[in-house]
Image (spheres, coloured by chain):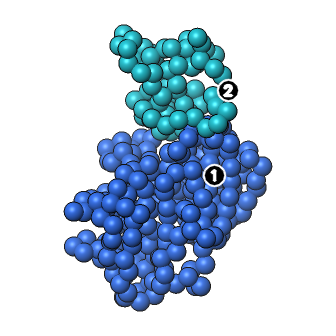
Amino acid sequence: MANSFILRAGERGHNLIPSSGLNASYVAGHPEGFITRESSFNFHEYQTGRAGFGRMRVFGDEVFFGAGCGYNMHPHHNFVICAFVLQGELTHVNTVGNIDQLHAGDYYVFSAGSGGKHAELSINGDEMHAIYIWLLPDQLLLPPSYKRAHFDAIARRNKIQELIGAADGALPVPQDFRVSRLVSDMPQKHVYHPRSTAHGVYIFVLDGELTCGEIALGRRDSAGIWGTDAIACETGAHTSDILFVETIV
Amino acid sequence: MADADQALKRLLCLGCGFLYDEALGLPEHGLAPGTRWDDVPADWVCPDCGAPKHLFEMVVIGYAAGQPQIQPAA
């Protein structure tokens, strides 16, 4: 018997974080720059929603506005931080030793482990859109690491493609956790198979439409489904872009 | 005071991932090894990111090989 929750786009936590005032040292960029963050789960000031889902604690839908905007170098431990760039150019700098530039389709896994810092910047003046996912690791104080890869929406269209996990070409994470993406250009039926009924799937519609049984999701809507080993869904008539986040629950 | 028979806990800051392990305390921040989370002052904040105490989550996760580098006091 499947369990589920639905989180509509407008029900998420909303923060507008200016790069001035109290946040001036945390948020990079000119004083008029700002970040918008839509949080699916409780995060910082937003504490009235769900605490997380399985091992996931943060699912942030973020936009950096203005030249140089983003997060200045700041510290982390333990969390495995994943970023999926949807639009614009993200410059990621970390203390593992990487200066990386990511564009639409690029994604990274930064495992902070025993301690690391990173900066996330949109250096040019274009809007940078990214999804940030944080998950708990399966061990504390692991050696910090950084890996990146690219999702090719054209070559992989109409297929559920595993981006993070144990699949060939996917980026591994130290957790029972997978992220897959489906970009569909036509109405199509798909079945997502979690590893077991003890795994849950958080389905987030980046764009377009997705129907999972009784659950109809539009742009930026999401649903958590657990207690089943098969999730049947159907994409909408136009381009649909979906993330499936699978975690032990 | 916390129950002395209770297993020592580990708590993770949800703002940044900073770890508070009761067994280790944070001697450099005035919290001796063995200091229970309940006995950490209510106005204490994450030394790395400033998140308040209520934004820490108890975790049951083991250490990676070779960690922690600071051993708990006997």
Q: Is residue B48 left or right of residue A181?
A: right
Which residue is depicted at the point 53% across and 45% down?
A137
Give residue A182's mark.
none
> On the image, numbered disc 1 is attached to which residue?
A110
Which residue is depicted at the point 36% across and 42% down?
A47
Label 2 packing within 10 angstroms: few (<14), some (14-19), many (20+) = few
Amino acid type of the residue that numbered disc 1 sits on in the rendered structure: Phe
> On the image, numbered disc 2 is attached to which residue?
B69
Picture coordinates of residue A124, whole percent (x, y): 69, 64
Q: Is residue A11 left or right of residue A85?
A: left
Amino acid type of the residue that numbered disc 2 sits on in the rendered structure: Gln
Which residue is depicted at the point 73% across and 44% down?
A95
- Where disc 1 sits, the SS reads strand
Note the chain letter of the blue one.
A
Q: Are marks 2 and 1 in contact (CB under 8 Å)?
A: no
Note the chain letter of the cyan one.
B
Q: Is residue A6 left or right of residue A19?
A: left
Against A211, is B24 above or below? Answer: above
User: In the picture, which quadrant includes the N terminus of chain A?
Assistant: bottom left
- Where disc 2 sits, the SS reads loop
Host chain of mark 1: A
2 vs 1, front mark: 2
Against A73, is A211 above or below? Answer: below
Picture coordinates of residue A35, whole percent (x, y): 53, 54
Label 1 packing within 10 angstroms: few (<14), some (14-19), many (20+) = many
User: Same chain for marks 2 and 1?
Assistant: no
Label 2 – label 1 distance at C-alpha: 22 Å
- Pick the front one: A112 or A86: A112
- Pick the front one: A51 or A33: A51
- Pick the front one: A113 or A138: A138
- Pick the front one: A247 or B40: A247
